[in-house]
Each structure stands twice: as C-alpha cells, then as structure tokens.
Amino acid sequence: MKIIKVRNYEEMSDIAAEYVTTLIKEKPDTVLGLATGSTPIGLYKRLIKDHNENKTSYENIKTFNLDEYIGLDKNNSQSYHYFMHEHLFKNININKKNIYIPNGFAKDINKECIEYNEKLKNNVIHLQILGIGSNGHIGFNEPGTSFSSEVHVVKLDENTRKANSRFFNQINEVPTYSITMGIKNIMEAKQIILLASGNQKANAIYDTIHGEVTENVPASILRTHPNIIVIVDEEASSLV
Ligand code: GLP
C-alpha cells in the first residue's frame, strides 16, 4: 500500500489526475473503474481540463462505475448516471457504448446484477478509483459485506443515507437500496487509487491503514491488494 499524504483536496485531485492521465496516454484503451460522491469531482474536473488543453482522448477508453441507487431512473438528477454524465462524460470524447453503470431502474434487478457481473468478468479494470464512506464502505459495500461478494443489491446503512442526504432535498428521498460492485470485483482491478479528504474520513482511513483486516471495515481489505495507492489529505490522515 503506497500512501501519499497531501495538504488538501486540491492537491489530492492534482495527483490523482496525474496518475489517470499518464495511464490513459500510455494505454489509450484503458478500462477505468469510476466512483461517484464529492471526492472524485476535483479529479474529474482536471481530466476535463487536460482533455480540453492537451487533447487526451477517451475514444477507446471503457469505464465501469461502482454503483447506482435502486429506483432512480437515469435522468433523475440524483442518479449516479446523471452525476457521471454531468461531472465527466458530457465533457470528454468518450464513446457512449463504452460507458457501463449498473441500471438501478432495471425491472429485474437480480438479472441486472448477474449481467453487470458478467460484464466485469469479461473486462479487466486497469485502474479503479475509489472514495470511502465514513464507516469504511467502498462502493456501496457496507460494514459486514463479505470480502468474496460480487455485484449485489444492498440495503443502505442509515448513516450512509444520512451522509448522502446532503445531495437530496430531504432524507426520505434518499433511496433505501442500491446495486454495487462487490468487494471481490473491486479487488480484481489491476491497480486501485483510494482518495480521501476531510475530517469525517479520518477514522475510516485510520482503520483502513492500521486496523485489523475485517469485513466490519470493508476498505481494510485494500491493504492486501498488490497495487494500491492511497491519496489522503491532512485532515483525512490526521490519525495515521
Ligand atoms: C457513496 C458512494 C461511494 C463514495 C462514498 C463517499 O456512498 N457510493 O462510492 O465513496 O459515498 O462519498 P463522498 O466522496 O461524497 O464522501
């Protein structure tokens, strides 16, 4: 586990963007695993800036997103489909057919899990971007999720719903269920970059780096990944 401590959110985003753009330039058919939440927004801004200024091309890049809420259609402004479109995809030259996000509005959600899992099996993710929940969740894999889990439906923790309610008008609008890559899917990525910024992530980062590897802290399994970089700002690494 390589740990890079930086001063703040801006530096964290700069370094993450440097890794991603370097990889894309070297390997124009990179398969990226992408995350939502406020943490990667600065990274996505920098990817867009680099695309505009340096013409880095996404024509042959494929992306797989970690997760999606169940019950929100793609055009709902709180869906992760919408988030990705607004914060990244509409601003780069990615081919729509190369974008994969679980469909949380599928009629048969179990079938959707199986199909998304199959797609992941048929594609190796070269670089997975991850954020972390304040309870140590990755994707939407809440504490207690099996390390051998694949794509599955999750009942969200009340804490996660509360934390994510800042994007909604009120907490009862936050969906109760989501579909997420499992921990096994995440660990299959060739390389992982975990990003964390802010005080509210300090405990989760401490547990991830120094705590026991336990299913009670989903991110703790990342310590066993052969190629993981953790980029943390001063606040998030204050206990490390
Ligand atoms: C959500 C997402 C996670 C994300 C986490 C942290 O629950 N499913 O992928 O890492 O929130 O979000 P933020 O970056 O906004 O703190």
Image (spheres, rainbow, N blue to C red):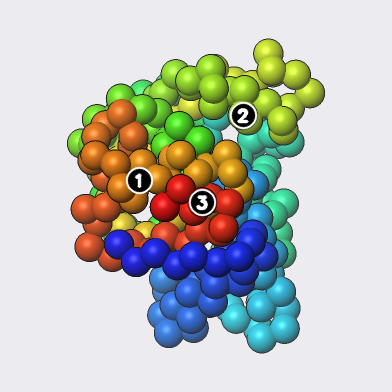
Q: Mark 1 points at which residue?
A: 208
Residue at x 44%, y 77% (from the top left corner): 23
Residue occupying the point 26% across, 45% down? 221
- Residue on which disc 2 sits: 163
Label 3 or label 2, whichever lies nearer to me, is 3
CA gap, disc 2 and disc 1: 19 Å
Tell me: 2 left or right of 194: left
Where does the image place residue 36, in percent across and percent down from the top left?
A: 57, 46
- The residue pinned by badge 3 equals 238
Answer whether residue 90 is visible to the viewer in this image.
yes
Q: Distance between the residues labelled 3 and 2?
A: 21 Å
Foreground pick, 18 / 94 = 18
Label whose residue precedes the other's in the sequence (3 or 2):
2
Q: What residue type is labelled 3?
A: Ser
Q: Which residue is drawn at 48% across and 20% down?
A: 157
Of the pair 79 and 35, the residue shown nearer to us: 35
Position of the N terminus by quadrant:
bottom left
Looking at the image, residue 16 lies above or below residue 194: below
Q: Between residue 100 and residue 65, name the one nearer to us.
A: 65
Q: Earlier in the sequence, mark 1 or mark 3?
A: 1
